[in-house]
Amino acid sequence: MNIVEPGKLAGEQLRARIAWYYFVAGMTQQEISERLGIARVRVNKIAGQLRADGSVIIDVRLPLASCVELEERLREAYGLASATVVPALDGDEAQRRVLGEAAASILDALFTDGQNISVGWGRTLSATIKQLRSRRLCDSSVISLMGGLTRGSETNTFGVSTELAKTLGADCYYITAPVYCSCVESREFLLRHGGVNEVMERARRSDLSIVSCGDLTPRTPLTTIASVRDRLPQLKECGAIGEILGTFLDARGVPIDHELNETVIAMSPEDLKKVPDSVLVSGGLYKAEIIRATLVSGYVRHLVTDEAVAQRLLQDV
C-alpha cells in the first residue's frame, strides 16, 4: 500500500501534511520526522512557520492535493454528494480524532435551525461531536438511531445523542430499548409501544443523519456484546462483512438473512437511504469493505474517511 511518498512531497504539500499530523493528529515532531523521512529540525521550523503566517489558526486551511484528488474520484465512483479524505494515520485514536475534525467541518455547514438530526453511536462519532462548535439550533431535535446497551459509555447511543443535543442546544429523543431483542416477537411488542414507535418514526423523518459502521473484529464495540459475539461464526457463514446501525451486510451491501437483523431496534439501511443528508464517518483499512458495501448500496450521501481507505475503495472501480 502506497499512501504517501515522502521523497516527492515538497512546498505546500509538505506543509499541509505536517499541519495535519502536528496540529490535528497530535503527533510529536519526532514521529512526524520519522514518518516523512525528514529531519526533526525541519519539522520544527515548518510547524513554527505555519503558526506565524496564519496557515494554522483553529483548523488546517491547506488542502492536500492527493486527498482532494481522491475526494473527486470517490464522488464520481459512488455518486456521493460530497467526500472528504484525511491523511491516514497509525493508531485508531489518532485516526478517529482527525476524522472527527474533518466531519465536524462538514456538519457545521449542514446544520440549520428546525432540523431533525439523528445519530448512531461509536467512538468515531463521539470524537466527531467533541470537535463540533457549540451553538443553539432553534426548533431542532436530536434523535438516537439505535437501541442502547445495558452499560454506560460515551460511545453508547445514549451518550452520543445526549452529547450532540447538548452541543447543539436541541431536544433529545432516545430509543428506550435494547439494540437487539431476544426474539422477533419481543421486537414487535416493543415497536408497538407508543414511546419507541414514536421515536423510530421521528428518526425516519430526519433531515440529517450522522452514522458510522463497523467490521466484525473486536475493534468494533458492537461485536463485544454477548448477543453478537456469540453469533460471529454464524454471521460470517451468512456472508456478513460488517454492520451499519446494527444491521449486518454482505459485500454487496445487502442485509444478510440472520436472526440479529430480524431483532435489531434501529433505523434500517433502506430508511437511512431516504434521509436527505446522511453522513458516514468511518476510517481504518480494516473497515474498508464494510464502507464499500455501504456506499455501493447508496445508503449515505456524504463520506468522511482516510487516504488508505479511499485508495482501497477506488481499486477496481
Image (cartoon, rainbow, N blue to C red):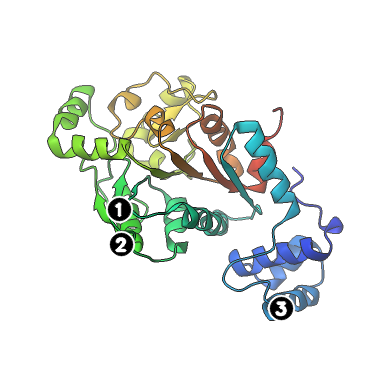
Q: Which residue in the structure is indicated by mark 2?
A: 169
Q: Which residue in the structure is indicated by mark 3?
A: 53
Label of residue 140 in the image: 1
* Dot placed on the residue nearer the N-terminal end, 1 or 3: 3
Q: Residue 67's spot in the image, x, y percent?
A: 70, 50
Q: Is residue 259 above or below residue 284?
A: above
Q: Is residue 283 left or right of residue 17?
A: left
Residue ID at (66%, 44%): 71
Q: Quadrant of residue 94?
A: bottom right
Label 3: state its secondary structure.
Answer: loop
Gap in angstroms between the C-alphas marked 2 and 3: 35 Å
What amino acid does circle 2 point to? Gly
Residue ID at (69%, 58%): 63
What amino acid does circle 3 point to? Asp
Q: Where does the N terminus fall, quadrant-wise? A: top right
What amino acid does circle 1 point to? Ser
Q: Residue 255's spot in the image, x, y percent?
A: 43, 23
Gap in angstroms between the C-alphas marked 1 and 3: 39 Å
